Amino acid sequence: MRFALALAATILLACNGCHHDGAPPPPNAADAPAGSAAPGGETVVHVEDDGKSFDVARGSTVTFELASNAGTGYAWTPAGVDPNVLVQQGERTTQTSSDVPGAPKMDVFHFVAQNPGTTTVEMDLRRPWEHGAAPGRTVRVTIHVQ
């Protein structure tokens, strides 16, 4: 019994400041205001964030998770991003809620805040084969990289 208590006490002392994932919290993450990210943090933008501004730290990630419906042919595409400020990482990925045809899906884009500055990101929901047609929906946010 004493051994078990001593072992538990040792683990608690050794793990002082640990977090469930084993990583320390990002610097000042608790102090960061809404709409901002600590260095190395992540800001997630959704359709409901249309028209909002976000302050992000250089080196942090800005992820767009935009809902759409599979089977309609519409997909989100980025436009108007200043690549000196925000750099896209990879291509669009898609997350679906089920394998059922027409199930809701999420188009996901990752960007890295490269340099200080401001850029407006426009995400257009469109069908790739409808050249020149107006998008079905547009989401615009302003990203301030500090």
Image: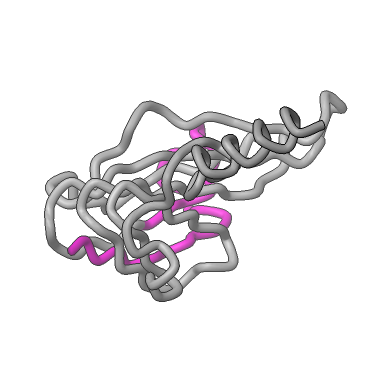
Decide if residue 71 is in sight here: no
Q: Is residue 86 left or right of residue 15?
A: left
Residue 115 against residue 32 in the figure, above or below: above
In this view, the residue farthest toward the front is 2
Nearest to the observer: residue 137 or residue 39: 39
Residue 78 spot, x, y in % from top left: 38, 45
Q: Which residues are magenta?
A: 122-146
Q: Residue at x 41, y 46 (%)?
A: 132
Q: Residue at x 75, y 30 (%)?
A: 4
Residue 4 against residue 68 in the figure, above or below: above
The colour mode here is one colour
Pick the quarter of the image with the N terminus: top right
Q: Is residue 53 left or right of residue 128?
A: left
Instruction: Give the quadrant of residue 87.
Output: top left
Q: Residue at x 52, y 44 (%)?
A: 13
Does 43 appear in magenta? no
Decide if residue 100 is in sight here: yes
Q: Residue at x 53, y 29 (%)?
A: 93
Pick the quarter of the image with the C terminus: bottom left
Nearest to the observer: residue 93 or residue 129: 93
Nearest to the observer: residue 133 or residue 93: 93
Residue 27 spot, x, y in % from top left: 32, 57
Nearest to the observer: residue 101 or residue 99: 99
Does 124 appear in magenta? yes
Residue 41 spot, x, y in % from top left: 37, 50
Residue 140 spot, x, y in % from top left: 41, 64
Q: Is residue 104 left or right of residue 51?
A: right
